[in-house]
Image (cartoon, rainbow, N blue to C red):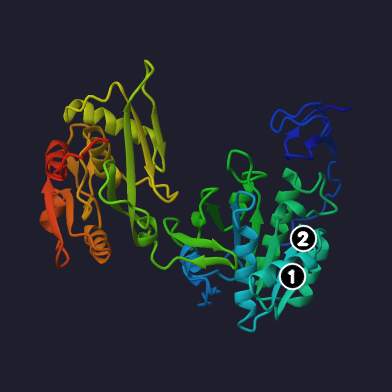
Amino acid sequence: MSKNSRIAYTCRECGKHSPKWLGHCPDCQSWNTFEETKPSTKRGGPPVLLNPALELSMVETEDKPRLAFRLHELNRVLGGGMVPGSLVLISGDPGIGKSTLLLQASSGIAGKGSKVVYVSGEESPYQTKLRGDRLGLKGHDLYLVTETNMDAILQHLQDLSPALAVIDSIQTVYLPESPGAPGSVSQVRECTVSLMQWAKSASIPVLIAGHVTKDGSIAGPKVLEHIVDVVLYMEGESLSTYRLLRGMKNRFGSTNEIGIFEMRGDGLVEVENPSLVFLSQRSQPSTGSVVSATLEGTRPLLVEVQALTSTTNFGLPRRTASGIDLNRLLLIIAVLNKRAGLSLANQDVIINVVGGLRVNEPAMDLAIALSIASSFSDRYVEPDLIALGEIGLNGEVRPVPQMERRLAEAARQGFRRCVAPANSASDVRAPSGMEVTGVTSLREALSGALRGRQQSKH
């Protein structure tokens, strides 16, 4: 082969290029996947420019309404609905409820008189009909397509021209001209690009369901998340009926919003009062249990933090965190040891956020610290009290944003006292009937909150 030859080789699985043939791809670890890439022999003139360059100030905008669903929790996470021509990826564990959510959302749009195409690569029309009957869906204007060939799917979409297209799932479809089996990196990427090009040109939104791997990440290439406009992740505990829909990426709205659903026999039902749900099984009074208010986007949620401390039987005590970052728990334990005088060096510490909710907000620090101290000292926190505040390394309690919204939600749920940073307590206007106690240090917070009687031991 001549040194001036432009022949190269490309991996059909991940698209990696190489100037010479390789038996083993260093990127995707596949074997015998490199194929010769033939050089182009065309030596024509300059390419035809289909889209001229435009100055941003001269681009005309058209106010197109979003496609709103009947599921308001879905609209909340999307930022008000689906933007025309957008691609939305919904992923989650098997059996979490992705197909149920997609079918309910599709039926809601079709129920308004708009045409919807539902492409199912995993179920037959009979199976989808059975699921629709169980959900109580009529199915008018909802067209089922059981194709896996992307060319055939695009032809159906072109002929029907729907208001919404649903692909369930992207790992089951394939392009005949693209190498690799359905679900491979190249197929998933090329099929998603084809859907994106059709959606942008037709200005029709597309909902895509995606599988996840064992570690919880979206199956297929990471580039899939870069191609789509919105990435939503559906999560929930295996033994819980509640499902959380969380935004991981959103080009048209915030990623801080969450939608909360309950899985029932007739499908997913929206949870109108999530704070009440997360506190429904709270036993009063109980040591190691403290309530705090966290913000998920614009929505304040009351969550219960439970802690359990016990003397370890091993040389190294265990630290277990469910619903919060483990490193944050280690920081709070260290501050309790150093600044508050709690000897936790020989204590196993277990923290759980009730309801399967995961919270990453520093405003939960004070509630976590109080729950640990409550369990360690066997003294309970008063049941009508909530705790808000970030804890610094020196044991100081730092202010948190949007205190008034958090306190308003707490007052609505019947809470009457709040332990909060002194700076926030002095600036906020407390709701009627709510007493806000300002504290500057963790020691002060512990002495003010752990005023319940000593719990009797059995």
Residue 1 sits in quarter: top right
The residue depicted at 55 percent of the width and 54 percent of the height is: 234
Residue 207: which disc?
none
Residue 52 seen = no
| Sequence-first disc among 2 and 1 | 2
Indicate the quadrant containing the C terminus: top left, top right, bottom left or bottom right: top left
* Residue 337 horizontal side relative to residue 121, left or right: left
Q: What numbered label is drawn on residue 123?
A: 2
Above or below 62: residue 431: above
Name the residue: 71% across, 33% down.
Answer: 28
The 10 Å Cα crowd at callout 2, few under 14, some 14 to 19, many 20 or more, is: few
Instruction: Tell me residue 242's x, y (percent).
Output: 49, 57
Q: Within the image, what quadrant is residue 199 found in?
A: bottom right
Q: Is residue 273 above or below residue 290?
A: below
Q: Residue at x 54, y 53 (%)?
A: 233
Element type at marker 1? helix
Badge 2 amino acid: Glu
Element carrying mark 2: loop
Instruction: List x then y, in percent, for residue 344.
Output: 26, 25
Q: Nearer the viewer, residue 184 or 60?
A: 184
* Kind of residue at badge 1: Lys
* Residue positioned 42% across, 68% down in the render: 272
- Closer to us: 356 or 2: 356
| Residue matched to label 1 | 129
Give whichever of 376, 222 is nearer the camera.
376
| Percent x, y of residue 281 | 37, 54
Where does residue 403 sit, x and y in percent of width and height?
A: 22, 57
